[in-house]
Each structure stands twice: as C-alpha cells, then as structure tokens.
Image (cartoon, rainbow, N blue to C red):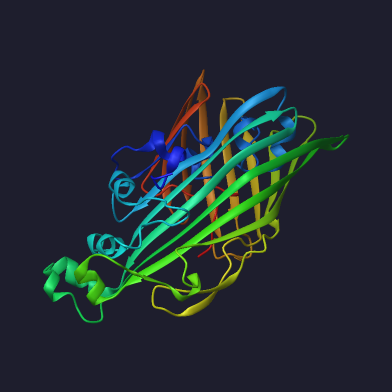
Amino acid sequence: MRRIACCLASILALPMWADLSFGGSPSAGMGGAGLAVIRRPTAQSFQNPAVIAYVQGFRFGAGNIDTNARGASFSRLLDDLEVRQGSAADIATAAGLLRKYAREDTRLLVTGDLGIIASGVGISVGGILDARLLPNAPLQTWARTDGNIAKIPANARADVIAVGVVSLPDITTGVRLPSPQGDLAVGVRLRNLKLYYTHYFADQEQLQAGQNATRAPELQGRDYREFSATGVDLGFLWRPTGDQTYTLALVVENFVEPNIRFQATDRNGQTFNFKPLKRTYNAGLAVELETGSLIAVDFIDIGNNAGRGEIRLGYEQRLGRIALRTGYASKTGWTAGLGIGGFNLAYSDTLPVVVSRTLNF
C-alpha cells in the first residue's frame, strides 16, 4: 500500500481548494448533522447504530467518505505522503518533506466506511487517517520571508505526526421496541480496531540536508507503533406515535473506550498522555415536514469531554429524486450538498468529521 489514502481516497484524488465529500454521508452537506435522521437509514447507520434497525432487506452501504486538507491541496499531499508499514512518510526523506511544507501547518484527513446490512445487522470496514506536518514559528517565518536553505534558523524544527485507525471489522446490530407512546430503536456497534501511530521531527541540520529525520522518543526506535483494541458505540432513536414528525437521538461514541493510551510528545517535544479515542455523548433532533423539508440539529460532545463540543444545523429539501442540502457547524462553518438518487456530493471550506470517525490529538 503506497498512497496514504489507499482505496478510500482513490476516487477523490482531485485538485481542490476546499473539502469534498464524494458519494459519502448525506450529513456531510448538512453541516454534519443527522444523528436523528432516518430518511436514509443505510447511510445514517454509520453515524448512529440505532438507525440500522430501520434497514429492511439486504443493502450495500457507504458512509463518511470524506477528505479534509489544510495548508496544501489534497492532490499535492496525496503525491507526497505515503504509507509504508504503518508510517506516513519514509524516514530517510522526511526532513525534505517537512522543508517543502514549511510555510504553515498542514493537515490531511481521510475517512471512509463500506459495508453490507441485512435486516438490522451490518458488517463494515472503515477507518480514519489524520496526518499533520507541523513547522514551528521560526521555520514558518523563514519559509515565508527568505527560503534560502543555508539560512534556516538554528532553532527551526518541524514534525510529522500521523495516526491511522482501521476497523476490521465493525459489527452493528439494532432492534426496534414499539410501544403505545412511540417507537424506540436501540443499536450497538462493536469495533475491532487497529491503530497506527508515527512521529518524526527534523532540526536545522536535518532540514538543510533534506533527508533523514529523527524518530520521536515514544516510537522506541521503531518507525511506527501498532495497537489493537476493541470499542463499543451505543445509539438510541425515539419516534413518537401519532402525527408527530420529530425524532430524537442519543449516540454514545466509545461507550466502551478502546484501551489505547501511552506517553507521547507534541510538536515542541513536551510529553503528554496520548488517548485518541475518548467517550463522547452526542444528541440529535430531526423534524420532517410535509413539504419534503428536513431540519436536523445535533449537539456534539456534550460536556466537551474530548474537546470537540459544538452545535451542528442541517437542512434538506427534496425535489423528486433530487435533494438540496445546506448546513452549519459551529467549529467548521457552512456546507452545501446535493443528492441524486442515492448518490451524495458535499462541499465546504472545512467539512465536519461525523460522529464515529473522530480522533483526539
């Protein structure tokens, strides 16, 4: 596997100046909102496991197939970053890579899920890759004002940090519990995870040479670290009986937290407790109107346990087989989307990462 995005991003290797979701979650065009949406249960089940209880028959599903690129274009990063046995860059050339991206912090985020669902039970594979190139302030100033390799400051430093998580596989099941008051759906997602972590840095001498970088101490002399763990997500969905058109949702991401934590170093070499997968509580409301309109509101990371607390708002208007979407996420801004049949496109300056595919570092 050579390219960093592998098959998850092969259809997304397009030059772009913003973020694009191509064939992924309908929620991407709605500001990331959709925890309580059951209009498209196959796609939404990747976000809220309770929604899988509404899937009838055999279905193939794709969700969360999104890319985010900051500081450089997606196509440029795709050309320069690669995966070699869990690492985001070849250590023999990492210093040259860091010098090339010295003007500003750069981040590449790729997510994707693919799976099959049969009457309330789903098996899927997916993952998230978060790679960051982090030059310090003296190096950024040099890149923007001088650029002479011989004049790289003595206190210059740049880091490449990357985390990849793959589910092998996710197993999701859900059940509906009808009552006179309404319909309650409960879903559970069992996640069998592999996590890969790498961190290199380069100082003045290495940046000038443009070749070898130094392994961060937490790698313990290796090119990357690999961890296996199990996590569990819970989802709940409530739809009242009668003429009510609203739906309520609660999703507990990492209800059983994957046991992955260790002492790592940040871009300044300071030690911290690295725990990329934390428990979060997320709530949603969706309202469907007779006009074909759908309004969704999500409250992400209630209590801010993982530092991702935000509000997401989304709107969809159906026009036959076409769906027009827009939304707003308080941390990432406006989004726009289009659905044609079962195919979805979304565009934003920064697409929000959907619940169930988030990392904390």
Q: Is residue 101 left or right of residue 57?
A: left
In this view of the protein, which residue sits in the foreground, 250 or 205? 205
Return the x and y of residue 347 as percentages of the image width and height: 39, 39
Hey, which residue is sitting farthest top in the picture? 320
Depicted 287 relative to depicted 100: above or below? above
Return the x and y of residue 355 as percentages of the image width and height: 58, 49
Depicted 70 relative to depicted 66: above or below? below
**Is any part of residue 131 visible from this angle?**
yes
> What residue appears at the point 49 percent right and 79 percent down from the top-left corner?
271
Return the x and y of residue 330 as percentages of the image width and height: 48, 55
Q: Is residue 36 left or right of residue 343?
A: right
Place residue 254 in its image quadrant. Answer: bottom right
**Is any part of residue 353 visible from this angle?**
no
> What residue appears at the point 53 percent right and 37 percent down from the top-left corner?
25
In this view of the protein, which residue sits in the foreground, 292 or 262? 262
Place residue 178 in its image quadrant. Answer: top right
> What residue appears at the point 51 percent right and 49 percent down from the top-left corner?
128
Q: How many marks?
A: 0
Depicted 2 relative to depicted 105: above or below? above
> What residue appears at the point 46 percent right and 71 percent down from the top-left corner?
221
For the N terminus, the image quarter is: top left
In this view of the protein, which residue sits in the foreground, 167 or 317? 167
Return the x and y of residue 320 as percentages of the image width and height: 52, 18
